[in-house]
Amino acid sequence: MGAKKKLKKKIKSLKALVKQSAQGAVDDVPLVSPLAPVDFPDLPPIRGLRLSTAAAGVRYKGRTDVMLAVLDKGSVVAGTFTRSATRAASVLDAQYKISGDGPEGAAILVNSGNANAFTGAIGVASVNALCAALAQKAGLPAARIFTSSTGVIGEPLPHDRIVAVLDELTAGLSDAGLPDAARAIMTTDTFPKGASATVEIDDQPVTIAGIAKGSGMIAPDMATMLVYIFTDAKITRPVLQSMVSRQTDRSFNCITVDSDTSTSDMVLVAATGQADMPVIDDATSDVARVFSDALGKVMLDLAHQVVRDGEGATKFVEVAVSGARSDADARKVAMAIANSPLVKTAIAGEDPNWGRIVMAVGKSGAEADRDRLSIRFGPHLVAFQGQVAPSYAEQVGAEYMRQQDLVIGVDLRLGVGAATVWTCDLTHRYIDINTDYRS
C-alpha cells in the first residue's frame, strides 16, 4: 500500500475515533453542566423511609436504573402530574391511586431509560405487573404502590428486567439511600439533584428531603420531570395535597428549558408521620404555613437545579415581569420571553439583543404598550418608554451577558400584575443530545 493510501486510511480511522468519542460524550458520559452545584447536598435520612437502587438494564448498561422507596405504615402521599393529553400508563395509574389512604404504608418504584409512554395496553400491563410483583415482595396492597418511568417514548417497557431485581431492591433498603436514588433516576441529566430543609415545629425538628430528575422536555404544565420529596411530618393527606399543588405552581410550573411538556412526569410528596409533633390538619394554621414555606423552598431549589441542568445549558436565567394588568398577563409575557428560541440563542451567544425581548413581549398575547415598556438586564436599564435608555451602553450589556446567572426584568407599567419564571439558554449541545437520544 502506498504512503498516500496509508495516510488516507489513518485519517479515516482517526475521524471515526473522534466521532465515536463525541458520541460517547453525548450518550454514555454526559458532560457535567457548568451550572451544576459543586457537590451533591448532604441529605438527612427521613424517619419511616427506606430506599434502594439496582441495575436492571432497562436501557442503560453498567449503571443503576431502578429506584425503590418504601414508606412505613401511616404514611400519606400527595402529588401533581403532567397534564399532557398523551400521559403514560404510570402517570394515569398514580393519578387514580393518589387520593387513597391506608394504614399499610406505600412504595414508589421508578425506572429510567424507558418512559413506558404511548405503549397502549402493553404499557398498562407493565404497570400492573410491576405493582403486583412489588406488592407481593413488600407486603403492600397494589393500590399503595406508585410507579414512574422516564426515558424513550413509544417502546414497550421490559418490566421483566425490573421484576428480576425486586429481591435485590427489597433486601437492600436503607434509610441512607437518597443520594443513590437520585443517580438511578437520571436520563440525560448531567448531575443528580437533591435538596433538604429542617424546621422547628413545637420545638421539634421536622425534616424534608427530596430528589429530582429533569434536563430536557421541560415546560410548565405541572412541569416535566420526576420529583420525589419525603418528610417525617405528621399531616393529613388533603392538607398535604393542597400544599403540594400550591407550591408546584410557584416552583415547577415556573420553569422551562425547551417549552416541551412530557408524557411521563410527576411530583410525589410523602409524609411518614414519624416526627414528634401534632398533626397538621388545618391548611390555614401557623404551623401549616411554616411547614408549607419549608416545603416550597425544597421544591424551588429542585426546580432551579432542573433548569441548571437543562440540556446544553450554560446560562441560568430569571425572567421577572412586573407592571402587568394581571398576574396572568405577567406570566404570559415571562413565558414568551423564556421560551423564545431567539432570546435563548442570543443569551447563549452573550448578545444583549434587547430587541428580541421586545419581540417576545409583543407576541405573548398579554396587553402591552410599546411606549410604556421598560427592560433591564440585571441592574442595567436597557430600554425605557419604548426606546433605548439614554444611559445604556451596549458594552455594559455585553459585559453583563457574560455572567452565568442572569436576570431579565420587564416592566409593562400598566398595573400591578407580576410573575417570575426561570429558564436557560439554547446551545448547539441541545441539538447534539437530542439528535442522538435514541441512537
Image (cartoon, rainbow, N blue to C red):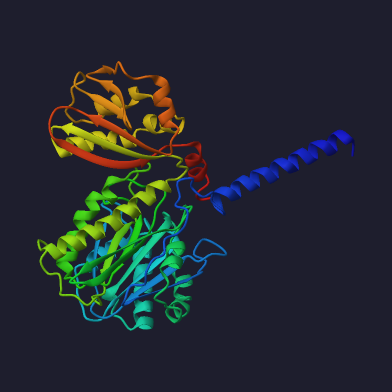
Left/right placement of residue 206 relative to residue 172 reads left
| Residue 404 place in picture, x, y as percent | 43, 39
Indicate the quadrant where residue 16 lies.
top right
**Which is more toward the observer, 416 or 222?**
416
- Vertical placement of residue 281 versus 218, above or below: below
Compared with 373, 284 (above or below) is below
- Single out the residue that lies furthest toward the right: 2
Q: Residue at x 32, y 39 (%)?
A: 318
Which residue lies at the image location 48% right of the left edge and 78% below the top edge?
A: 168
Image quarter hosting the N terminus: top right
Q: Position of residue 149 (x, y in %)?
A: 39, 62
Q: Would residue 33 be visible to someone looking at this image? A: yes
Q: Considering depth in this image, is 95 or 46 the residue closer to the camera? A: 46
125 lies left or right of 206 = right
Residue 427 screen position, x and y as percent:
47, 37
Q: How many marks?
A: 0
**264 with respect to 14 (left or right):** left
Q: Position of residue 44 (x, y in %)?
A: 37, 69
**Which residue shows up at 27% across the image and 16% down it?**
387
Above or below: residue 170 compared with residue 407: below
Res. 221 in view: no
